Image: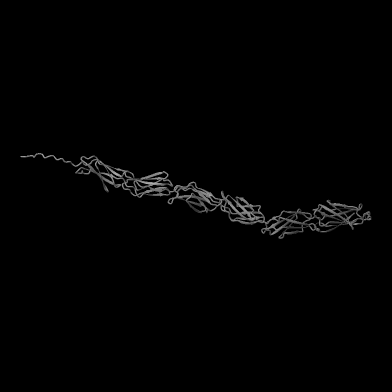
Amino acid sequence: MQCNSSQSSAFTIKTVPCVPQDVDAHMDCDAGYMSVSWELSEGAISYIATAEGSNVQQCSANDTLCDITDLYCGETYNVTVHAHDDSCDTAESPSITMRTVSCIPQNLNVEVDCNTNDASVSWAHTKGAVSYSATAEGSDGHAVSCDTANSECQINDLHCGQMYNLTLTALDGVCDNSQSSIFDFSTAPCAPQYISTNLNCDTKSTSVTWEKSDGALWYVTTAEGQDGHVTLCNTTETSCDFMDLHCSQIYLITVTAMDGYCQSINTSIFETETVPCPPQSVQADCDAVTAFVTWEQSNRTMSYTATAEGNDGHTATCTTSETNCLIPDLHCSQIYSISVLAFGETCSSIQGASYEIQTAPCAPDEIIVNVDCNFNRVVVSWGRTNGAMSFDVTAEGSDGHTHSHNTTETRHEMLDLHCGQPYNITVTTLSYSRNGISSTSVQIQTAPCIPGNLTAELNCDSNAVSFWWDDTEGAKLYTVTARDSQRVTALFNTSNTMAQISHLQCGEYYTISVLATDNICKSPQSAVVNVHAASDSTCNHSQSSIVEIQTAPFHGNKKNYIQTLF
């Protein structure tokens, strides 16, 4: 027989809370922690959420949400939640996989290509990153970026002369906000603009100026001449002076901006011309007071000016586009320094070597001429002139006769001048080179010639004598004198070349002379004729009378003439 006991008193028990369901998690990108959520579990008093990866971190909550902190960046965590009551814990919920925000990119580096202004960016691989985005923002507001899944990329088309702030963002598909610290880099300086040159005509230097370039710390200015000469100028300013450029050259000027790492690209080339070279091989010949100057041609020259500067301060010039010119009207008896300047479009050359010449001695400033009427002798005297080695004395007569003599004295006597002639007398000073200047001519008149061909004719009826003579060179008047054996019986002047003397004494001997005069001088001798006045018996019987004529022709030679008168 089966028997059942009576029923015990009732005992209440509570089962284990249900396993949390629908576990979910997400990263708070700004705060950097993981928020885990789940559905309410029956019987649960509290919950513990666990993230297990490279480290294990938990959070607890009485409701269905808690935040897990201190997770490692770029890690994958398995997240579970279990519930518990007063005595039991549930089993873990099904796990979910969560990735934390990627780590901050490290070891960021930038290399700028100075020739292209492109930047190569590199970095260390960042844990948790799927891809990267590098962004560069310039001080002028220009921004450019590159995206890649690798640990390097290139940023192109950067502006010159700018400071860029580079940031690298690691993209992880979770937060995409892991950003590196800012990396600063600068691009190559901009090429200087508005280059200009100025040629200083006083110092013969070339000044180069330009506008300030973005990114430049200093500038290197290069001048390269056609002859291969190259010179540099470094400066932190925006101008540079070249003092050593070669003359007569075209120089190509470039200004390059520098920043210590890069230099500017696409630098403009500016062309400038230097001052002409001073003409070489300057030579000069002097003809009296005119200098003929020659020199060698200078390149890049438009004209030349030759200058003659004398010891007395006198200056004369000539300007030409050729390689020679004449400088007239120099002062006599002076040493001149000859120099030649070449002129370009803007400036002249520096002063080159000079050449010395000596002008011809000055002409004597006072010529004194004394004429000796008695002997047709002329004495010329003058003062000595500085630089004169000898003197040419010249007398030129109107009949073509010329007297010339060279002497080292300051006095000369002329004995061969023709009578009755005007003469122009000059004295020319001569130097070693036979250059000379003639004095102002002095005009003189030599003594009149002796009247020639004096002829007399006795008129027996009137007992008078008629006589005549040739016109005499240089004569303005004639003085006629008649003398018998005792005294002068007639004396008169006439401008004619014939005269008559009457009332002769029969049988008396008369001497008739004719003297030529020009109001200053008289002819050195007289023409003379001797007349024997006929007696009454002689004339009445028509016998001839003898008239002796004695003349003194030109140059002092004497001849006797006998003429028979009827």
Residue 128 versus residue 435 in the image, above or below: above
User: Which quadrant of the structure image shows residue 458?
Assistant: bottom right
Q: Classify the position of the N terminus by image quarter.
A: top left
x, y percentage for residue 168?
36, 46
x and y percentages locating residue 270 in the rendered image: 50, 48
Q: Is residue 168 left or right of residue 241?
A: left
In the image as oriented, which residue stretches furthest toward the left? 1
Indicate the quadrant where residue 310 lies: bottom right
Front residue of this view, candidates 504 and 373: 373
Foreground pick, 317 / 45: 45
The C terminus - image quarter: bottom right
* Residue 12, above or below 547: above
User: Where 135 falls versus 379 (above or below)?
Assistant: above
Report if residue 145 is visible in the image. yes
Q: Residue furthest bottom?
A: 408
Which is more toward the observer, 59 or 277? 59
Query: Going 82% across and 54% down the picture, which residue do you hit?
Result: 516
Relative image position of residue 152 (x, y in whole percent): 36, 48
Name the colouring of the figure.
one colour
In the rendered image, residue 468, in percent from the top left (x then y), is placed at 85, 53
Q: Quadrant of residue 534?
A: bottom right
In this view of the protein, can residue 94 be seen by the observer? no
